[in-house]
Amino acid sequence: MNQVKQALKSRTVRFGVALACLSVLQGFVGFIPANPAIQAATGCVIASLIVVLRYMTTKPISEK
C-alpha cells in the first residue's frame, strides 16, 4: 500500500490514472464520435505507457 501512495505522488502517474478513467467513461458516454471500445482501449494503452515511462525516469518515485 505504501508503494501505491508513493506512486500517486507523481503527477505522471496521476495523469495516467485519470486518462484511463476518462477513456473508460468515453467508451460509455461517447464524447468523440468513434467506436467506443477502440477509444477506451487506446486510452488505457496510453495511460499504461505513461506509467511505464514514469518508472523509467532518472528520479525514482520512492524519492518523492
Image: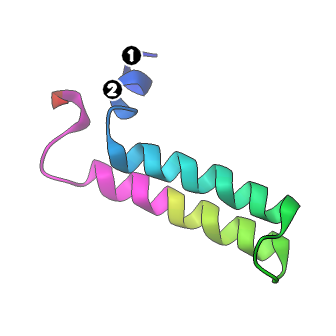
Left or right relative to 59: residue 52:
right
Residue at 33% in and 26% down: 6
Element type where label 1 sits in the image: helix
Task: Tell me residue 39's x, y (percent).
Answer: 73, 73
Residue lying at the far front of the rendered structure: 31
Task: Tell me residue 15's x, y (percent).
Answer: 45, 51
Does the CB distance between marks 2 and 1 fall below 8 Å?
yes
Element type where label 2 sits in the image: helix
Q: Residues within 10 Å of mark 1 (few under 14, many from 20)?
A: few
Residue lying at the far top of the rendered structure: 2
Dividing the picture into quadrants, the one containing residue 62 is top left
Q: Nearer the viewer, residue 9 or 32?
A: 32
- Amino acid beneath label 2: Gln
Q: Which mark is residue 13?
A: none
From what the image shows, is residue 11 above or below residue 39? above
Q: Which mark is residue 2?
A: 1
Task: Give yes or no for residue 59 being in the magenta stretch.
Answer: yes
Query: How far apart are the two marked residues, 2 and 1, measured between alpha carbons?
Result: 6 Å
Task: Tell me residue 10's x, y (percent).
Answer: 32, 40
Task: Give yes or no for residue 36 being in the magenta stretch.
Answer: no
Left or right relative to 21: residue 60:
left
Q: Which mark is residue 6?
A: 2
Query: In the picture, which quadrant includes the C terminus?
Result: top left
Q: Residues within 10 Å of mark 2 (few under 14, many from 20)?
A: some
Range covered by the magenta-colored residues: 48-62
Task: Tell me residue 4's x, y (percent).
Answer: 43, 26
Query: What's the magenta bit mostly, secondary-structure-wise?
Result: helix
Residue lying at the far bottom of the rendered structure: 34
Residue at 48% in and 52% down: 16
